[in-house]
Image: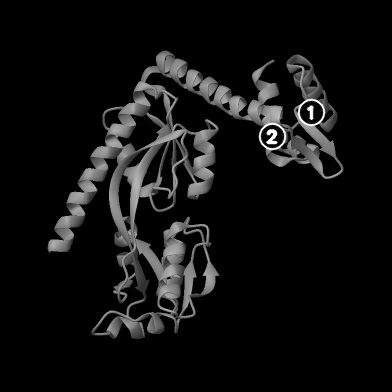
Amino acid sequence: MNLDDLTYFLAIAETGLLHRAALKVGISQPALTKVVRRLEGELGVPLFVRSPKGMQLTRYGTEFQRNAISLRAAYEDTLCKIAELHSGDLAKVRVGATPATEQLINRAFLALLKRRPALRLDLNVQLSDALMRALLEGEIDLAVAPMPVELPEELVAVRLLRETIEVVCRSGHPLSALDSPATPAQLARYTWILPGQSVSARQQIDVYFERHHVEGPVVQVQSNYSSPVGVFSLIAGTDMLGICSTQHRPVAEQYGLRAIPASRADWPREIACLVRKNGSLSPLTSTFMEQLVQEAARFRTTSKRAKTA
């Protein structure tokens, strides 16, 4: 059994179809079939049930998949540690971020770069669900993301900061002239640019309208907010409403956007650094994590001063 066989097996298990798995890993379907037969022969049990609809894992296959993910993650960890020992400051840190936390990663990288000028950063920016999968499968070593409602038991979290989500509009928008917080009915009069319903911030907005028995929000543009600049430029040029995290507030202000207080609304979320419970971080990755904690503390201090001012 070798690492390639594990990778091919995981591709089949994930896609459930040989032709899709073949495209994903770049080998032929007959070669994948041979891999499955070889693995089943070595283990002495069937890993898949084959049907016209695809390849379904047996109970043996499900257990093997769980361990194969751990084995591949451990292998990737070992490679990173050896690379760091061999290359010193040239070692690579593999980090995942959501669009809302990318700036925090960037600040930590720039601060650490002053002490480690040869530092390399492999940054993977995705939504939270995709980051969790990448972390569990060993594609990244740590992720900075909103704290999930249910943390997978294979992960541990270090809380970094607490931020809030605000509704924003263009300068001169009718809602910006209100003397009191906007009501749900007033917010529902306008269309929105929001992320999909799998994103926690969107879920908070949806629950807000449901709780007040108001139909909304009407989403005119659905965006994963991977580019705040693109989202904020759309809001600045229309009457659409959008959302802005605490970390993206300086970017929103550059586009002249204004926060709209919403009546009886409180949309906080915890930002955390997530790592695998059973994995060990390389010294350089641990240093990067420590830098993240320091940058989060600086951000909290700056935010408090801004609110006081």
Q: Is residue 91 visible?
A: yes
- Residue sitting at x 44%, y 52%: 99
Q: Is residue 44 left or right of residue 100?
A: right
* CA distance for labels 1 and 2: 10 Å
Front-lying residue, 75 or 23:
75
Image location (x, y in percent) of residue 120: 41, 30
Quarter of the figure with residue 56: top right
Bin the neighbour count of mark 2 within 10 Å (Cα to Cα): few under 14, some 14-19, many 20 and up. many
Q: Is residue 121 visible?
A: no
Q: Are marks 1 and 2 in contact (CB under 8 Å)?
A: yes
Image location (x, y in percent) of residue 19: 80, 39
Q: Secondary structure at mark 2?
A: helix
- Residue sitting at x 44%, y 42%: 151
Q: Secondary structure at mark 1?
A: helix
Kind of residue indicated by mark 2: Ala
- Residue sitting at x 17%, y 50%: 301
Quarter of the figure with residue 55: top right
Work out whether mark 1 precedes mark 2 in sequence or the reverse, and give the earlier one. Answer: 2
- What label does residue 11 carry, if any? 2
Kind of residue indicated by mark 1: Leu
- Quarter of the rendering occupied by the C terminus: bottom left
Residue where numbered disc 1 is placed: 32
Q: Is residue 133 left or right of residue 111?
A: right
Q: Is residue 246 above or below residue 159?
A: below
